[in-house]
Amino acid sequence: MYITVKYFGQIVEVTNTQEETIEVAGGHVSDLVEVLNSKYDQLENKDFQIAQNQELVSLETELTGLEIALLPPFAGG
Amino acid sequence: MSRYNRHIILSEIGPEGQDKLSKAKVLVIGAGGLGCPILQYLTAAGVGTIGIIDFDKVELSNLQRQVLFGTSSLGENKAIAAKNRLEDLNSDIEIEAYPEALTYQNALELFNQYDIIVDGSDNFETRYLVNDACIITKKPLVFGAIYKFEGQVSVFNYNNGPSYRCLFPKPPKKDAVPNCSEIGVLGVLPGIIGSMQANEIIKLILGIGDVLSGKFLCYNALLNQTSTLKINRNDAVISEVLNRQSTFGKRTLKINCETNDIVSIQDIINNENIQFIDIRETHEAPKVDELSVKNIPLSSIQNHLEQLNNDKAKYFFCQSGTRSKRAVVYLKEQGIINCYSIEEGALEIKNYLKEQFKEKTNVR
């Protein structure tokens, strides 16, 4: 399946793109993260949460396609 | 009431809504990039009681985005400078300035005096402290944070909704995310995000519209894109905070930033409620006898922490400004707040004070 992956904040500095389409065989959110970790070796050092179709999910959540967002925390004020 | 006419003629607000605003009590943590627009709109809207807590001072590099301050406020405490400006904007409301750091020791008592807590701080340590204190005191938290060209907004701990920890359970690994003022930021961005926070606060008070509870808004100023993500309450995370409630007041805040720790004698000499500490060994000369100075040698500072007055701003000096810097780093690690290193050495301080004294006597 094809998934649109969106990146925010500090994550963009690792991926150098705000958004891309990734092909995965399916499975869980963790499977997609594994694909992304092998594509971007700096990603493992970043803190982020994951949203699927605009809803916060865990690594164990099943991939349903459409959209995944990688959301890092911001401290600035 | 003509001041609030444009609110009152809105059927969704009316005189009843304006009355709710005038009875509301809102505490804003941090009078920086986010705090300035938040405070400005709350004051203009006639929110009856506004608290401002900030230990920091106004610096020239703040003026690019912290719109309450001008060059005349440089060197002043931000909470006090903000209060002075806001009182000119609206003298009908109560504004309380707290020129101190928010800590695990003062947070709960302070939060209990307000209805809504607003996070405009600039570091994770404070953000988690604010979140946990809101859970314990059962106060809604209007959250905002920024990074370069992007911002995040949400309302936490409202009507059984999620807290910040339900989204990000633990603070990020040290140094993984830049803290404080280490990175650049588009000046107008905190204006946008802070205004969104002010909007949520006013909606909360009035009880109108949809509040950003259970939702996390991400804004990108370069792309003009907004994404709103749905987040759920995690009861386990909230229970953990409540279970640790009894030790809350014993924890220490370790803010991992070194900005504004170094000051010049010229900027602080007229400040009130301060303590000067000479951290040189007792045999070192010259002594600065123009000031009331406490001598605590760096080599034995760990044994004399009780001599440091927690309520006062503490200014450390040595022969050249190097050891005093080390002292401040050490004391911060011990959770002692309000410590600053004077960049001038003892001799320079002495000469400066003599000059000042001469000028004063010449005027007479």
Image: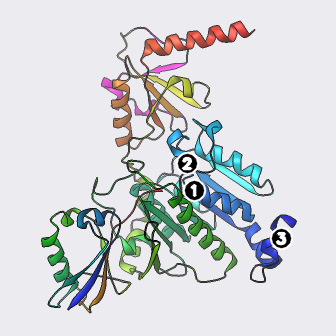
What residue would you read off at disc 3?
A: B5
Q: Of residues B275 and A40, which is closer to you in this image?
A: A40
Percent of width and height locating residue B225:
45, 74
Q: Chain of mark 3?
A: B
Percent of width and height locating residue B332:
38, 40
Residue type highlighted by circle 3: Asn
Residue type highlighted by circle 1: Gly
What residue would you read off at disc 2?
A: B54
- Residue B158's place in the image compared with B54, above or below, is below
Q: Of residues B126 and B239, which is closer to you in this image?
A: B126
Percent of width and height locating residue B323:
34, 25
| Residue at x 38%, y 37% (from the top left corner) | B331
Report crowding for label 3: few under 14, some 14 to 19, many 20 or more residues within 10 A (C-alpha): few
| Residue at x 17%, y 91% (from the top left corner) | A26
The magenta stretch is B286-312
Q: Is residue B94 left or right of residue A23?
A: right
Quadrant for the C terminus of chain B, please.
Answer: top right
Report crowding for label 1: few under 14, some 14 to 19, many 20 or more residues within 10 A (C-alpha): many
Question: Element at badge 1?
Answer: helix
- Residue B225's place in the image compared with A47, above or below, is below
Inter-mark Cα distance, 1 to 2: 10 Å
Q: Earlier in the sequence, mark 1 or mark 2?
A: 1
Q: Earlier in the sequence, mark 3 or mark 1?
A: 3
Q: Is residue A4 left or right of residue B346?
A: left
Residue type highlighted by circle 2: Asp
Q: Is residue A4 left or right of residue B185?
A: left
Quadrant for the N terminus of chain B, please.
Answer: bottom right
Check contact, mark 1 vs mark 2: CB within 8 A: yes
